[in-house]
Image (cartoon, rainbow, N blue to C red):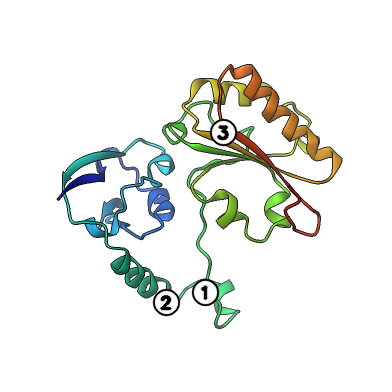
């Protein structure tokens, strides 16, 4: 069948492996230092790997390909995730499968992030206070997954992120914006910077604010 599927340009691939980490179906693996689509039927064609690639090596193409096979993916992931782990943390907790990181790009600090990068194209953007990932246990699954992540703390950094975030929102095709903050008053700084940047960008982008309590609950 003819369908949309990813294409990896090996000449552009720098071997960072971020696309393999971002692929929730395990369709991409690193082979001889390059990313490779292992099986067509593992690729769902949604492209979560695209914003993860810092070099723009991954694009969509339409070609003859096997249909996406969800059951085959489940078997593949079960076999892969059930393999023995070299992680010391996993070894110290028998019976607990290590949870894969959902981070799809680097760096994540607002101060260090580039204003424009291939992973911003069509991205769902997460701007989060850095404490939120420690307070909310399922932060990777519930917030980072499928999003480009930027974190910061205006109080500790002693800066106003508004100008930097305005540039990022203005110069890139951002699909939507999620702001995650703690309930503490000082966290209002990151919410203010993000919302002011959105206004200054002059763009209409769907957005939401999620507040995390100090005991790890979502308040709104």
Question: Where residue 5 sits: x, y (%)?
Answer: 25, 46
Q: Secondary structure at mark 2?
A: loop
Residue at image mark 1? 97
Front: mark 3 or 1: 1
Which quadrant holds residue 13? top left
Distance from disc 3 to disc 1, alpha carbons, whole Å, reads 31 Å
- What crowding class fits label 1: few (fewer than 14 Cα within 10 Å), some (14-19), or many (20 or more)? some
Q: Residue furthest bottom?
A: 94
| Residue 161 can be seen in this image | no
- Total residue callouts: 3
> How far apart, in angstroms, are the residues tagged by discs 2 and 3?
35 Å
Pick the front one: 11 or 2 = 2
Residue lying at 24% horizontally and 59% vertically, measured from the top left: 41
Which residue does the image show at 36% across and 45% down from the upper left?
47
Task: Read off the residue under disc 3.
Answer: 113
Which badge, 1 or 2, comes first in the chain's sequence? 2
Q: CA distance from mark 1 to mark 2?
A: 8 Å
Residue plotted at (31% across, 48% down): 45
Q: Report the front residue among 106 and 40.
A: 40
């Amino acid at each position: 069948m003819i369908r949309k599927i990813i294409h990896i340009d090996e000449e552009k691939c720098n071997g960072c492996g971020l696309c393999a980490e971002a692929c929730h179906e395990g369709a991409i693996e690193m082979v001889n230092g390059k990313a490779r689509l292992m099986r067509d039927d593992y690729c769902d064609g949604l492209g979560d790997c695209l914003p993860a690639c810092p070099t723009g090596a991954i694009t969509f193409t339409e070609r003859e390909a096997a249909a996406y096979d969800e059951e085959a993916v489940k078997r593949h992931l079960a076999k892969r995730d059930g393999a023995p782990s070299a992680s010391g943390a996993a070894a110290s907790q028998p019976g607990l499968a290590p949870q894969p990181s959902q981070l799809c790009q680097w760096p994540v600090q607002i101060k260090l992030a580039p204003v424009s990068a291939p992973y911003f194209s069509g991205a769902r953007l997460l701007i989060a206070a850095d404490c939120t990932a420690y307070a909310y246990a399922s932060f990777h699954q519930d917030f980072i997954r499928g999003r480009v992540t930027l974190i910061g703390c205006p109080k500790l950094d002693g800066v106003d992120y508004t100008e930097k975030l305005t540039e990022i929102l203005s110069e890139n095709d951002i699909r939507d914006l999620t702001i995650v903050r703690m309930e503490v008053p000082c966290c209002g700084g990151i919410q203010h910077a993000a919302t002011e940047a959105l206004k200054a960008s002059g763009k209409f982008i769907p957005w939401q604010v999620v507040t995390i309590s100090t005991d790890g609950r979502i308040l709104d």
